[in-house]
Image (cartoon, helix red, strand yellow):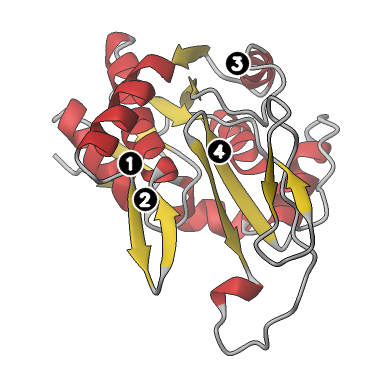
Amino acid sequence: MTTILKHLPVGQRIGIAFSGGLDTSAALLWMRKKGAVPYAYTANLGQPDEDDYDAIPRRAKEYGAEGARLIDCRKQLVVEGIAAIQCGAFHNTTGGLTYFNTTPLGRAVTGTMLVAAMKEDGVNIWGDGSTYKGNDIERFYRYGLLTNAELQIYKPWLDSDFINELGGRHEMSEFMIACGFDYKMSVEKAYSTDSNMLGATHEAKDLGIPELQRQDRQPDYGREVLGRKREDPCGRGHRTL
């Protein structure tokens, strides 16, 4: 049995890890229109930047999902976070800087729990919005197969047909609008954020290119939490936490 499917399995059930963002929304709608039977699974990881978790499965149904479920992953994420702290594995330090493993822990919980939910529904093909360039494609592949050894993988961003039709944010936005969904493409940000109840990690275009000259920017120290404040390490007074 082929594990990785290079083209859309028409007529078959496909589970997609659905965030409600442009990538997964366009992918779900595209798969439905091309003849697949998509099921949407959304992980509740206690993301502080999500206002209404229950609205995400509803949107998935509007885009053509045969079924849509919100999976509460918070308890398991807490368990994994505590275990990582106990093992001294909650953070990595490289170049004198600390990187907290909040996103990798979230991916492990998401991959295992969503695949388990899919298996309950008789869905044995996994899909998500990760591209061939990043490490998420490997994470979900490995965690999924650990949970369901019979799992097959279909990722739109490995399908040349999908890429040729919807290979960028502009194309995906236009596709959604043409299909009757008022999904305007937001201005592309210079960074992306992955958050869950353990914390958040950020990727940035300029920060990922060492050759570019460093740009000094006024840091944003976030919002007030329980009225606690901390000293600004750059010597500009106090900042609210």
Q: Return the x and y of residue 230 as percentages of the image width and height.
A: 67, 46
Mark 2 in CB contact with mark 1 (< 8 angstroms): yes
Q: Visible in this render: residue 60? A: yes
Q: For the residues marked 4 and 1, what is the alpha-carbon distance in whole angstroms?
A: 17 Å
Three-letter residue code for mark 3 = Pro
Disc ID at residue 137 = 2
Classify residue 146 by image quadrant: top left
**Image coords of residue 80 (percent x, y):** 29, 29
Residue 140 is labelled as 1
Q: Amino acid at mark 4?
A: Ser
Pointer 3 or 2: first along the chain:
3
Is tag 4's residue or tag 1's residue first in the polypeptide sequence? Answer: 1
The CA distance from mark 3 to mark 1 is 20 Å
Give the class, few, some or many, for how many residues have Cα within 10 Å of label 3's Cα (few <14, many ≥20). many
Residue 57 marker: 3
Residue 121, image x, y percentages: 34, 10
Relative depth, front residue between 231 and 57: 231
